[in-house]
Image (cartoon, rainbow, N blue to C red):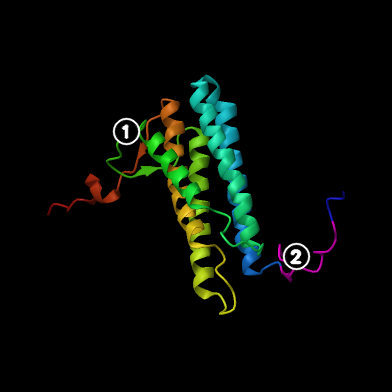
Amino acid sequence: MKIYTKTGDEGQTGLANGKRVSKDHVRVDLYGTSDELNSCIGLALSLWQDQDGRSHDSARTDALVEQIHAIQSLLFEMGAELAGFPTEEGSILPADVDSIEHWIDEWNEELEEMKQFILPGGVPASAQFHVCRTVCRRLERMLVAANANRDAEESEFLQHVGMVWINRLSDYLFVVGRLCNRWSDQPDIPWKSRMQRPSRSKKKD
């Protein structure tokens, strides 16, 4: 099978429901951003496996890899829904929300309590998981806008349970970003507000 089809050379593409639309169609933008998020997550996981994961407990690393692969597969399912593939129950199920919440709680138990905002960074995998988190938040904003501004005859671009899952996914990515630093003995990087620095205090006469 050839990689290129030439059917999109004029700036149009086919949705999962068979409809031909412009490549700047809202559905194309949505599933394209979902694909971007999936790719970013793949990079983050590769960074962890290549640079940081080898020396860590293999059972927990394997559990993390299994979770992330499951998330990437669900993002493919969600991409099909965003592309207009007809489904009654949606691509994301309540059980998927339960699973990701369980994972968040499980990993968060290994982390120190946050007492201030932290900066993205640390080991490469952690920094990349924070990139993933921001892409996930962007996708969520796009979905909220798309659902709010859709035509009357258009169904929701992503069902409610899918919206909940996307919201939880950004939380999961934040926790995993911190986890990569924790497992690498890299402390969180605290945000230091300018408002709390001596240079911002009232000047003496």
Q: Residue 139 at x, y = what percent?
A: 53, 58
Residue 33 falls inside the magenta stretch: no
Q: Residue 204 at x, y = what percent?
A: 13, 52
State the mark number for residue 112: 1
Label 1: state its secondary structure: loop
In this orientation, which residue lies closer to the viewer: 87 or 54?
87
Task: State left or right for residue 120 relative to residue 155.
Answer: left
Label 2: state its secondary structure: strand
Looking at the rendered structure, the kind of residue marked 2 is Gly
Q: How many labels, in total?
A: 2
Which circle's residue, 1 or 2, is located before the other in the chain? 2
Q: Main secondary structure of the magenta part?
A: loop
Residue on which the image places disc 2: 14
Residue drawn at x 56%, y 80% is 152
Report the magenta residues as a range.
5-22
Residue drawn at x 57%, y 36% is 45
Residue drawn at x 35%, y 33% is 109
Residue farthest to the front, as pictured: 88
State the CA–CA distance, disc 1 to disc 2: 48 Å
Task: State left or right for residue 13 relative to residue 26.
Answer: right
In this orientation, which residue lies closer to the viewer: 151 or 125?
151
Above/below status of 117 relative to 6: above
Dot in front, 1 or 2:
2
